[in-house]
Amino acid sequence: MTELVFVPLGGVGEIGMNFALYGYGPKERRQWLIVDCGVTFPGPDLPGVDLVLPDIRFIEAERKNLAGIVITHAHEDHYGALLALYEKLSPDGAMPVHMTPFGAGMLEAKAQGEHGAPKIPVEIYDGGQRFTIGPFEIEAIAVTHSIPEPVSLAIRTPAGMVLHTGDWKNDTDPALGPLTDEPRFRALGDEGVLALVCDSTNAMREGESPSERQVSEGLAEVITNASGRVAVTTFSSNVGRIKSIAEAAQTAGRRVLLMGRSMKRVVDVATDLGYMEGLDPFLGEDEFGHIPRNQVVIILTGSQGEPRAALAKLGRDEMRDVKLTAGDTVVYSSRTIPGNEKAILETKNRLIDMGIEVIEDTDALVHVSGHPRRNELRQMYKWTRPKIGVPVHGEAAHLAAHAKLMREEGIADVMDARNGDMVRLAPGAPEIIDDVPHGQIFKDGKIIGDDDAVGVNDRRRLSFAGHVSVSVILDRKHEIAAEPQVVAIGLPRADAHGEDLEDILFDAVVGAVESMPRGRRKDLDAVEDAVGRAVRAAARNAWGKKPLVTVLVDRV
């Protein structure tokens, strides 16, 4: 039976890491289309990990049937895993990735900054364009979002049309790019939309999102009224916001300094594509000290509390040429990504202690989301009139609220899918027909793999209870030939009574060996096991925790 199916492998039941599959054809010969290939960033529970990626075992196994890859826009959670996963998806390097010009520019800039990045062939498309990938005829529809050139995708197959919204909102006065193409969405509705796979990020918020132009006005007011320097931190990918801040600064008679590698990379790509026209040249950091305090605006990275970002460094006074002082203003033109609250608060507290005024979106209209609120979702339903609704892009609460709204607004079939669910959209009534392998893998330096492959579980234990290394040398009579070496890292220096902890562990090592019958000491593995158990037990008794223990036993 020929079927049209949808499988989310990331971003459904969580924020970030968007990765969706569409399949068409009989089960044994089904062809697949990837829409977006996103990444998310590790929290403190993943020490040392660089990136969190979707587990793509399922599509790797179906690689011979993979027709192509389409990226809706160049946010990290939609395209950021391409460099890490491309060689797994296309070992011969022949599979093209379809992207808009801005997305292609961002991918090229990203690859230039990553040693050994794969060479990915890119097919450029524009909003309004149609193109074919295998059995899928795809039409890109312009929408508004917080990045240049975002699109929704109308994916046509003989079994019906799916409208994959990607990230979008209905901004009637955007700072950059065209309006959301309402006439085209209405025309698609007239043609007949089988399924609407739709952004759920703001499905819990009533009303409509404010316009980006209103945010521009709010930022201009803050900059105009400030007496000292103004630093505005925002997402580096939000080109429209960056341009709005720069325009507001120019109107207020101020020069603009960009700070942060990712910010400069995005602006370089946007400049090449003509998105930054009309702006004065940006300051160099070496010019900053020569500009009066009330004549400068800094646009910089660090809105999520990243410790190595420009704002955190300014808060720690670690920049050579650029400084903030009492009386200056820092504006957070961004939202807090869940999990980053503590890091953001730490940076804010440092700034406040320096005498700097901190302004966020609860104080003034300095940020707005790039995702649709409930009235905008209702508009999309009205325009497209889908038979099936599939909420995506959100955590469980967002998806549940969106599913409820879809049902309230009369969508006949609403699928409560999660990552790994294979949803049959046609023929017949929609249903979940399979659960495919899914989850998370990690990029750690040059290594990509699961918890065990990159050693995350042991790192967690190391961060909690430290490590003890022990070296024991036995002579030919199986007696201790030299004083055992014990090195404890990440453990307290002494127990509660002041006794040196390494001395306690040393005694445990000697006792473990000497308590073994001499004949048993011939088995070096048995000695290693006994010493390891003794060290862990001694640490637990003296400290209350069991560290990781490595024991090396040799014979001379």
Image (tube, grey):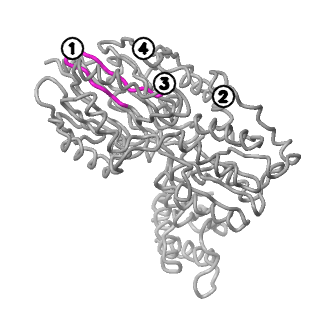
Is residue 418 found inside the magenta-colored segment of the image? no
- Tell me the CA gap for discs 4 and 1: 20 Å
Callout 1 amino acid: Pro
Q: Residues within 10 Å of mark 3 (few under 14, many from 20)?
A: some
Q: Nearer the viewer, residue 522 or 242?
A: 242
Residue visible at 57% across and 19% down in the picture: 119
Q: Nearer the viewer, residue 454 or 294?
A: 294
Location of residue 389 by image quarter: top left
Number of dots carrying numbers:
4
Q: Earlier in the sequence, mark 2 or mark 3?
A: 3
Mark 2 sits on what residue? 276
Callout 2 amino acid: Met
Marker disc for residue 42: none
Residue visible at 36% across and 23% down in the picture: 153
Q: Is residue 5 left or right of residue 222?
A: left
- Tell me the CA gap for discs 2 and 3: 34 Å
Q: Is residue 324 left or right of residue 163?
A: right
Classify mark 3: helix, strand or loop: helix
Q: Which residues are magenta?
A: 150-165
Mark nearer the viewer, 1 or 3: 1
Q: Earlier in the sequence, mark 4 or mark 1?
A: 4
Mark nearer the viewer, 4 or 3: 4
Classify mark 2: helix, strand or loop: loop
Which residue sits furthest bottom? 497
Mark 3 sits on what residue? 87
Mark 1 sits on what residue? 158
Residue visible at 44% across and 31% down in the picture: 37
Mark nearer the viewer, 2 or 3: 2
Mostly what secondary structure, the magenta segment?
strand
